[in-house]
Amino acid sequence: MKGINHKITALYCRLSRDDDYNGDSSSIQTQKQMLELFASQNHFQNTKLYIDDGYSGTTFERPGFQELISDIEKGLIHLIVTKDLSRLGRDYLKTGYYLENYFPNHKVRFIAINDSVDSSKEHQEFTPFRNIMNEWYAKDISKKIKSAYRIKALEGKFTGAYAPYGYMKDPNNKHKLIVNPETGPIVKKIFELAKSGLTTFKIAMVLKGENILKPRAQIIKDHGKYVTDNFVKYPYDWSNRTIYSILTNMEYLGHLVSNKNRSKSFKDRTLTNVDKADWIIVKNTHEALIDEETFNIIQPMIAVKRKAVKETKVNQIFIGLLRCPKCQKTLSFSRTQSRNSFGTFACSTYRKFGKKYCTMHYITYENLYQAVLSDINKHLLQANLNEQELLNIIMKQYSKKQRNDLEVYKKDLKKHKERFNEIDIIVQNLYEDKIKGSLDERRFIVMMKSYEEQQKELKLKIDHHEGEIETFNEKKDDTNRFMSIIRKYKKIEVLDAGILNEFIEKIYVHEVTHDEDNRNQKIDIHYKFIGLISK
């Protein structure tokens, strides 16, 4: 007995957010007072507190519990006391393992005060059932918490522990985001650098060179959380992944995005990605840091995997834009040792599998650059001289027949709607005649059926004509969007990735043809919103 008195009486306390749903007071302070009083009344000496504050009972990877196990392995503990069984854990299989195997094998007594469990006494058969009920409770609480978070997300309320980088929680409303004056400008800078054509790696290097704290280090600074040696030693080491996650985050458009990942189960907190179609997106919940146009320009620029290549005079500004018109695959870039060219583009299918599957579609960097620059500047000049003329050229792509059809649709639509409304009045009069007795039932049914068929046909025509008119109006809207880009520039001297992705959707490079010893190559430039501009 003397040896036991020198061993530790472990007083174990645990509290998690699950316990917010518990009617009893389960605070750590309350648990400590209860356990210390119990130890004193029962003359348990050499007490030591082991505390897990903010840890779920469904996992046993808790620092306080792991310290407890470590001390058991060292032979330092003879008794463990908890407020109740659920403090030890809510996974009945693992809790049962510790109670029925691990503790007895290490000669450790276990007491759960409120549940009247004492492993030194006989007749403890009900203990396993308590463990099962604790697990059921944990599962039920998990469902309630998920449901509560989902409701808040659908209401456009932010529920994360920390605001996205660039934002902060509103001091007056923790569910609302406001721009962080310190990090908000950094987010804008990251998007500007990406728009200029810098890769995620190069953006990370720029931020590191300017000693800008990475997001996790910013949390350490602002909240004192996640402090580790690595974060303290390397607070400015931005990663490609972090830059990419910022550039693809719709929350910078002012939209709240939730349900992007979920835990596998209430026992396994490992997060898995959720399909984008199942995300909860509530628009315009907070101030946007980035406009939608900039965001959309950048997405195709960063969606393409960029190979790690040595830096040369050529910045790969055409990445993601070039297509083979035959197989629809991308054109891949190859650097050359020639003094006359920085490199060449060719069909990736041809380069991988040979001419049996596709042809070369070969073009030098210089020829492509010059052709694209020339075409963009041609349209800029045309817009500056006579904007209406460029508008007319774009709208001509909507054929003359389609424009004539549009006028017919408008006239017919008006006529069909008038007739539809006339039938409504006729039907109303028919009902009145039937009620008055001036129209017999059989005749009423025949006439009603005829008018209903007419209205059904009219409705189909109305829907079709409205759809055609809407399509034409969308075309006009797209033209206006393109013209808003054109109006930003007078003349472009140098192309970069930002300009290309702002103007261009894709570029098709055709095969070279020869006509009377002249080398010709057709390049189709599909501009944003409007596609090809007819010559």
Image (cartoon, rainbow, N blue to C red):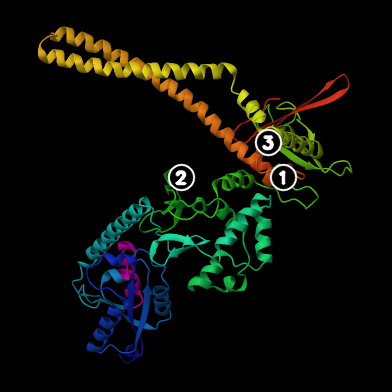
Residue 327, position in %: x, y? 66, 28
Q: Nearer the viewer, residue 323 or 143?
A: 323
Quadrant housing residue 207: bottom right
Mark 2, secondary structure of its residue:
loop
- Disc marking residue 330: 3
Q: Amino acid at mark 1?
A: Ile
Q: Nearer the viewer, residue 62 or 341?
A: 341
**Which residue is drawn at the image coordinates 38% and 63% (left, top)?**
173
Give the left or right position of residue 489, taking residue 435 as reference. right
Locate the N terminus and report the quarter of the image it occupies. bottom left
Q: Is residue 155 above or below residue 57?
A: above
Q: Does residue 207 appear in the picture of this structure?
A: yes
Earlier-in-chain disc, 2 versus 1: 2
Judge left or right: residue 339 versus residue 526: right
For marks 2 and 1, give the CA distance.
Answer: 31 Å
At 33% across and 77% down in the image, what residue appears?
Answer: 12
Mark closer to the chain start, 3 or 2 = 2
Above or below, comparing residue 297 to residue 40 in the picture? above
Q: Quadrant of the C terminus?
A: top right
User: Is disc 3 placed on a helix, strand or loop?
Assistant: loop
- The stretch of residues the image draws in magenta is 88-108
Q: Residues within 10 Å of mark 3 (few under 14, many from 20)?
A: many
Magenta stretch: dominant SS?
helix
The label nearer to you, 1 versus 3, is 1
Name the residue carrying label 2.
Answer: 275
Viewer-side residue, 278 vs 141:
278
Q: Which mark is residue 317?
A: 1
* Left or right: 314, with 85 as reference point: right
